[in-house]
Image (cartoon, rainbow, N blue to C red):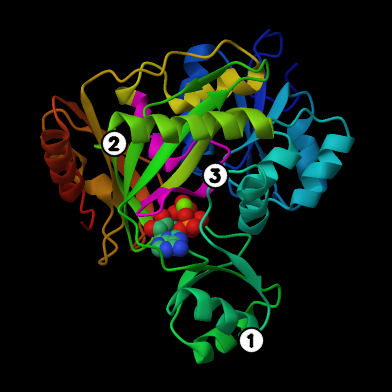
């Protein structure tokens, strides 16, 4: 265990977890790894990425480069991910080379390709929005005839934080978008969404599974801005969402944590998408649950016993710190945010840019309304646009 290039003790018995990606999810996984004595080794493109700055061992390279991925995997007990932006074909090659990938490539594809996920989940009998894969304006028009304009179009691969999701107002716009998307577009109706929910579960390589409380995800401009835990919904709906996530995790053979994004619509719960990694909807678990999603992911991919998922307070709210239009850096305003009693501030050491997720604030409280007001106040002190 451990490689010659490791900055850690060479004689250690510590488990080595390699993670493709070195952003804020890897940074927070590093915090959990320290407590468990796990050596986290990340694949970073640049030496100033958040997880590298947080002290994780690292290899420099691109996730598109098989040699870089093999070097990352060399001597590691398991390889896992902090994002989906990696060619599924490379993962299959790594698997063939004997690398222990958790989750496995076939499961990971559910998070990498929205079209594949829609088809698979539908095949397994889970409720998904009406969808089609369109390559021509005629196909778009036929779908619009059934569901009405505007439509929602998505690039099947490569999107995140709403990038790759846009509305199509009419056939002209459809023609323009199809011209720049030669692989076609995933189309859906513009759904009437009452609430967006996220159901997180964890599954260990041993098959053990646990579910976190179902949360509400508040989106603005197709980006997650707030998480309310537990979701203010009736127990039956929450139970239904959690059961769906548990069943999907089991049937797809997912390992580590998985976040299931759901739409609560007049037609019932619909599955939007999955993330097979720690997720923005689970940041609140650091202070808000007995076991954080980051620790849980490490336990799951290593085949270790999973931790308890109960809330540590009656209500927990997380608010993202999003870069302000003027480009100001929240790092300069930490003392002001810390003056807000009860605010747990997390910043990701990322360069401030308008609209970029730069950190988050979590507040544990007696009720959602109070916790939310406090979290929003602290986020505003950090310059976050509401
Ligand atoms: N068919 C739809 N009808 C209405 N709103 C939608 C629809 N699909 C997506 N949205 C909105 O856009 C958001 C982003 O969509 P989606 O989750 O598919 O994209 P993403 O960029 O992968 O997301 P993420 O922010 O999770 O990375 C959703 O959370 C929802 O608010
Ligand atoms: Mg999403």
Picture disc at residue 15: none
- Mark 1 and mark 2: Cα distance apart in space: 41 Å
Residue 44 percent coordinates (x, y): 62, 44
Where 331 sits versus 171, above or below? above
In the image, residue 253 lies in the stretch drawn in magenta: no
Q: What residue is disc 2 on?
A: 231
The stretch in magenta equals 263-286
Q: Is residue 264 left or right of residue 174?
A: left
In the image, 105 versus 124, the foreground residue is 124
Which of discs 3 and 1 lies nearer the camera? The answer is 1
Q: Earlier in the sequence, mark 3 or mark 1?
A: 1
Q: Which residue is mark 1?
A: 138
Q: Secondary structure at mark 3?
A: strand
Residue 85 visible in rendering: no
Q: Which residue is mark 3?
A: 274
**Residue 278 lies within the magenta run:** yes
Mark 3 / mark 2, whichever is N-terminal: 2
Within 10 Å of the Cα at label 2, are there few (<14), some (14-19), or many (20+) other Cα atoms? many
For label 2, the SS is loop
Q: Is residue 164 visible?
A: yes
Q: Is residue 304 above or below residue 152?
A: above
């Amino acid at each position: 265990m451990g490689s010659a290039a490791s900055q850690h003790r060479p004689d250690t018995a510590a488990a080595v977890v390699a993670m493709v990606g070195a952003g804020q999810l890897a940074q927070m996984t590093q915090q959990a790894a320290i407590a468990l004595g796990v050596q986290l080794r990340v694949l970073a493109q640049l030496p100033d990425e958040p997880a590298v700055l947080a002290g994780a061992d690292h290899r420099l390279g691109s996730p598109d480069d098989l040699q870089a991925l093999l070097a990352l995997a060399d001597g590691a007990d398991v390889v896992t991910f902090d994002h989906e932006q990696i060619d599924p074909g490379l993962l299959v090659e790594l698997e063939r080379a004997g690398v222990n990938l958790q989750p496995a490539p076939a499961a990971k594809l559910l998070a990498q390709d929205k079209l594949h996920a829609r088809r698979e989940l539908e095949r397994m009998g889970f409720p998904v929005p009406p969808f089609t894969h369109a390559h021509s304006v005629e196909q778009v028009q036929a779908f619009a005839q059934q569901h009405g304009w505007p439509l929602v179009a998505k690039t099947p691969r490569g999107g995140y934080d709403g990038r790759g999701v846009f509305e199509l107002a009419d056939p002209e716009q459809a023609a323009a978008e199809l011209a720049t998307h030669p692989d076609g577009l995933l189309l859906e109706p513009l759904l009437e969404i009452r609430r967006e929910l996220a159901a997180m579960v964890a599954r260990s390589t041993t098959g053990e599974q646990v579910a976190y409380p179902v949360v509400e995800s508040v989106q603005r401009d197709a980006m997650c801005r707030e998480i309310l835990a537990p979701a203010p919904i009736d127990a039956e709906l929450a139970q239904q969402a959690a059961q769906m996530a548990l069943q999907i995790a089991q049937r797809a053979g997912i390992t580590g944590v998985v976040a299931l994004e759901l739409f609560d619509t007049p037609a019932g719960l619909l599955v939007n998408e999955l993330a097979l990694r720690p997720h923005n909807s689970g940041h609140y678990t650091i202070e808000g649950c007995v076991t954080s999603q980051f620790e849980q992911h490490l336990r799951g991919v290593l085949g270790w016993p999973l931790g308890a998922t109960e809330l540590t307070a009656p209500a927990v709210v997380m608010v993202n710190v999003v870069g302000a239009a003027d480009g100001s850096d929240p790092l300069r305003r930490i003392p002001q945010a810390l003056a807000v009693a009860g605010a747990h501030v997390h910043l990701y050491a990322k360069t401030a840019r308008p609209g970029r997720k730069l950190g988050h604030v979590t507040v544990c409280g007696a009720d959602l309304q109070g916790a939310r007001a406090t979290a929003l106040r602290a986020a505003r002190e950090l310059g976050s646009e509401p």
